[in-house]
Amino acid sequence: MWSLDWSWLAFTGSEQRDYLERILTCSVASLAPGETAHGLLLSRTGRTLGELWLLTDEGRTLAGIASGGEPVAAELEKFVLAADVSIEHLDWATVAEQAAVADGWTSDGDNVRFRALLGQSVTAGPGLTADGDPQLAQLARLAAGIPDWDAEGVARRNPLVVGLGALVPAEAGCYPGQEVVSKLRNMGGLQRRLTRLQLSAPVEAGTLLERDGKPAGEVTSSVLQPDGSELALGFVKRPREGERLVAGDAQALVLGPGLLDDLPF
């Protein structure tokens, strides 16, 4: 279980919901006990600092942070100021019982990411489940187009660039970095963005992508599929679904955005 590598927090106090609503990209204030949310903590320049899964409980809000937990917790504490909010660090055993009844913590895209990161059973293709197998979990992640915090360099990137647009919806309230994200979304300023790819042969992460002999991006993650082809993620300059690129000695078919990417190609 990868859950032991996560950081788990509990927010308490009369202003906990207002505080989280003010600093995260997801809606928290109206959640009923037992309901969940999935959002991001951004810098004022629109860079991703942390990704949080929230579960409301009686009198408190639980949060799971999959990567960079301690720095993210420190950032969260900076926003408390004079608000009636307390932040407590928890262990997985304390959270497990509540998480078990949360039905995967929200929507399909979130469910794939949450369960894959925890090493639980996720669909990796027809008749396949991950069930703690790292390769099948990787296959499930890439099939869903879900970025890895390290491989795709989520930290410090704009969420629209790394395929997390659904976590910064256009209708979201005011949060740090909103103006930058909204401007990028509305003006179509994405030069490169994370893209699902199907490769004709295995390639290493970091392999450059070419379009008509010119640089077009790079592969960041890949995994072998049961049919012998390679499924991958990569950053592509102005991708077009269905186009074919060159990745070293392989052909790369652009499949489209992932489950948590709400911007069409």
Image (spheres, rainbow, N blue to C red):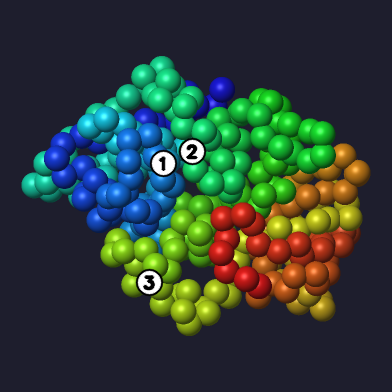
Looking at this rendering, what residue extends furthest in the front direction? Answer: 32
Amino acid at circle 2: Trp
Q: Determine the secondary structure under disc 3.
A: helix
Q: Quick check: 92 above or below 184?
A: above
Q: Are marks 1 and 3 in contact (CB under 8 Å)?
A: no
Amino acid at circle 1: Thr
Q: Which residue is mark 3?
A: 180
Q: Quadrant of the C terminus?
A: bottom right
How many residues crowd around disc 1 within 10 Å: few (fewer than 14), some, or many (20 or more)?
many
Camera-nearest residue between 151 and 2? 2
Q: Is residue 131 left or right of residue 223?
A: left
Camera-nearest residue between 49 and 160? 160
Q: Residue at x 37, y 56 (%)?
A: 25
* Residue 74 locus on image (x, y percent): 27, 41
Q: Are marks 2 and 3 in contact (CB under 8 Å)?
A: no
Instruction: For residue 69, say whether it is visible.
Output: no
Q: Which mark is residue 36?
A: 1
| 3D distance between C-alphas at marks 2 and 3 | 28 Å
Foreground mark, 1 or 3? 1
How many residues crowd around disc 3 within 10 Å: few (fewer than 14), some, or many (20 or more)?
some
Q: Which residue is mark 2?
A: 105
